[in-house]
Amino acid sequence: MTSLPTWWLGARPRTLPAAFVPVAVGVACASNADDPVWWRLALAAAVSLALQVGVNYANDYSDGVRGTDDARVGPVRLVASGLASPGAVKRAALGSLGVAAVAGLVLAAVTSWWLLVVGATALVAAWTYTGGPRPYGYAGLGEVFVFVFFGVVATTGTEFAVAERVTLDSLVASAAVGCFACALLVVNNLRDIPGDTDAGKRTLAVRMGDAATRKFFALLVAGAGVAVIVTAVTAGVWALAGLIGVVAARSALDAVGRGARGRDLIAVLGAVGRAQIVFGVTYSFGLALALAR
C-alpha cells in the first residue's frame, strides 16, 4: 500500500501555495465589506485546495497512463514511478475533485447558485487539463487555465464568498495572483521541455522554445509587480507591500536567466513557491491595511 508521505509527495506540495494565495488575497479584498461572512472562508479555502490537489493527482494519472512521465526529471510522479497504481491515483484525483464539488455546492447554496456554473467549469477544466481524448494542456493552454482559475476565479470568488461582491481591487489583484501561479507552471514546463517534446506534449514552453520561455517567466513576475502597483493606485499605498513577494522571486529570476535546466530547475520551482507564499502574505496584509482607510 502507498504510504501517506508518498501520497503527500504525489500531491506536489510545492504547488499548493497556488491554492492558498488567491484565498488570502480575496479575503483581504473583502475585509472592508459592510457585512462579511467569515465562516465562508473555510469553504472557499477547501474548494481551492481540493481543486489544486485534484489537478495534481489527475495530471499524475493522465500523464502516467499516456507514458508522458517515463523520462521525467522533476518531483516524484506516483503512476510513472510505480509507487501507486493508476486506479488508485485516479480515485485520489476524483476524490479530491469531489471534495471541491461538495464544498462548492454548499457555498453556492448560501450565496448564489450561479457559482455552480463556475464550479462545474472548473472541475471539467481540471480533469481535461491532461485527461480526456484532447487534453488542452498538451496544446499549450495550461497557463490559460491556471491564470483564470487559480488567479481570477479563485481570488474574486473568495471575495464573493465572504462579501457577495466583486470589486475592481480584487479583479486587478487577481491578475497579480494569476501571474505568480503561471510563473510556477512555466518553470515546471521549462524543466520538462526535453521530455515533453519527445512525448508529444506540446506545452506552451515546448511551443515557445527554451529562450522565449525564460523571458516569459520574467515577464510574468514583472506582470505581478505591475498589477500590485495598480492596486496601490486603486486601493491604497499599503498594497505596495506585495512588491516584497515580487522581489523575493529574484533568486529564481537569476537562476532562470543564467540558464538553469534539468534538476537545477527543481530548486528554482521551490524558490518560486516560497516567493509566492511571501507574496501572498505581504500582499494580502498590505491590501487589508489599504482598504481599512
Image: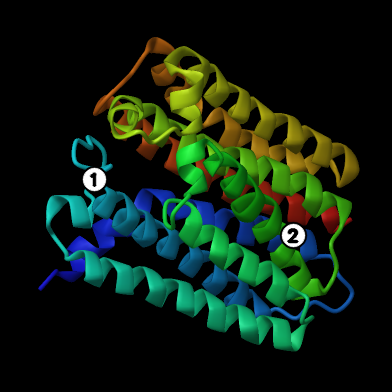
Residue 156's disc is: 2
Quadrant of the image containing the N terminus? bottom left
Judge depth for marks 2 and 1 and give the one in front: 1
Q: Residue at x 16, y 64 (%)?
A: 84
Q: Residue at x 85, y 44 (%)?
A: 236
Considering every residue shown, the one lying at the far front of the view is 133
- SS category of the residue bearing label 2: helix
Label 2 CA crowd tier, 10 Å (few <14, some 14–19, many 20+): many
Q: Is residue 293 above or below residue 204?
A: below
Q: What amino acid does circle 2 point to?
A: Thr
Q: Is residue 77 above or below residue 96?
A: above
Is 57 on the left-hand or right-hand side of 36? left
Instruction: Residue 170: give x, y in percent of width and height.
Output: 78, 53
Quadrant of the image containing the C terminus? bottom right
Label 1 CA crowd tier, 10 Å (few <14, some 14–19, many 20+): some
Q: Residue at x 48, y 52 (%)?
A: 129
Query: Closest to the observer: 171 or 30?
Result: 171
Q: Is residue 149 above or below residue 194?
A: below
Alpha-carbon span between mark 2 and mark 1:
37 Å
Residue 67's disc is: 1
